[in-house]
Amino acid sequence: MRILITGNMGYVGPVLARHLRANIPGSVLVAYDSGFFGHCLTTASVLPEMLYELQYFGDIREVPTTVIAGADAVVHLAAVSNDPIGNKFEAVTEEINQKASLRLAEISHKAGVKSFVFASSCSIYGYAEGGARKETDPTNPLTAYARSKIGTENALKAMDLGGMTVTSLRFATACGMSERLRLDLVLNDFVACAVTSGEITVLSDGTPWRPLIDVEDMSRAIAWAVRRPAANGGAFLAVNVGRDEWNYQVKDLAEAVAYAVPGTKVSINKAARPDQRSYKVDFSLFKKLAPSHIPQLSLEQSIARLCDGLTAMGFADKDFRNSSYIRLKILEQHIAAGRLGSDLRWVGQH
Ligand SMILES: NC(=O)c1ccc[n+]([C@@H]2O[C@H](COP(=O)([O-])OP(=O)(O)OC[C@H]3O[C@@H](n4cnc5c(N)ncnc54)[C@H](O)[C@@H]3O)[C@@H](O)[C@H]2O)c1
């Protein structure tokens, strides 16, 4: 099976490459990325991209059809991948996350791809009071990032993509260790706080609900989706990916990290304005469709892996919230140095 992975040089990609190599033996892995974060290796002693047969560099907005030729499946990760970046680059977020994704789906279909996997997000539920959100419940995207994900999903659903199975994986918030670690994710941030300063400063009042999933379990779901037959869920499927037990309130996450790293204090800003984003998610459809690919890791395991990874790196930067472990900071550094334009295109290369 030949699998094209876009956006492979980010946080999820390195873990996914290892997972696909181990779990889909004989697969040919081809990758395409703009390389924004290529230099941000944290724990690897070997370049994660060595696991691919072929690595292309380029912008997803102009991906050539030759990159897709011969692929059986496309796993589309390339994106402006969080709210702070989306807020700063709103129009570009729509261009990259939505317009380019739809073009990619179209040319993948024309190239005879059988399975198209789109990395969507539970953030499309935005603020949801009451019970856990099911796929059939209304969405409430509050940011440019979330709007781009649901916009793409809706358009993919409406497109006639013939025999190409489309799976939109609405991932819970990612966490866990990766060769390209990010610390702009709630659990990763808390573990980095605990390891570097012994104090977790929660930026909200701690009450928002946030379902989580480890990057390894995201990879498990992707490995299922690339081989999903249309008979299991339909030719187009949008499914919440996570586990019911992993619906946490932010303050519970802070307490779990403090428990795992003895001596850690938790300070919750009770005066903070309530976070607008709060949602519980129902993952029963995923469990029904993919019983052998549901998340396996426990919260304690994810925290332990992060602690071990940060310790192995000798990580001690108390000011990491302003460091290059934050995706937006890296893009800003590229732009300030004149390497990248504000349209998020490399200067002088295209
Ligand atoms: N991390 C999460 O919490 C989470 C949760 C739900 C969904 N997702 C989705 O999963 C996917 C992967 O997430 P991640 O955390 O690895 O993101 P990431 O930001 O770490 O990596 C994204 C990758 O896409 C590439 N990319 C961005 N714009 C591009 C462009 N114009 N052309 C080519 N490549 C481009 C970047 O260089 C980067 O390597 C994203 O689509 C994200 O929205 C992530």
Image: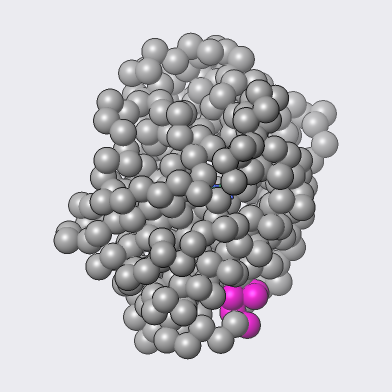
The magenta segment is 154-158
Residue found at the very far left of the displayed protein: 26
Left or right of 27? Residue 42 is: right
Question: In the image shown, does 274 or 290 lie closer to the viewer?
Answer: 290
Residue at horizontal 74 percent and vertical 63 percent from the top: 140
- Quarter that holds the N terminus: bottom left
Residue 130 coordinates in the image, percent (x, y) = 70, 62
Residue at horizontal 50 percent and vertical 35 percent from the top: 37
Image position of 209 with respect to 232: above or below: above
Image position of 238 with respect to 307: above or below: below
**Picture quadrant of residue 325:** top right
Left or right of 144? Residue 72 is: left
**Picture quadrant of residue 312:** top left
Q: Is residue 157 magenta?
A: yes
Residue 122 coordinates in the image, percent (x, y) = 59, 58
Residue 264 coordinates in the image, percent (x, y) = 52, 17
Residue 110 coordinates in the image, percent (x, y) = 46, 79
Image position of 21 with respect to 349: above or below: below
Left or right of 313? Residue 274 is: right
Residue at horizontal 64 percent and vertical 43 percent from the top: 345
Q: Is residue 207 visible?
A: no
Q: Is residue 199 magenta?
A: no
Residue at horizontal 46 percent and vertical 67 percent from the top: 65
Please, which colouring scheme is shown?
Answer: one colour
Image position of 229 with respect to 11: above or below: below
**Picture quadrant of residue 190:** top right
Majority secondary structure of the magenta segment?
A: helix
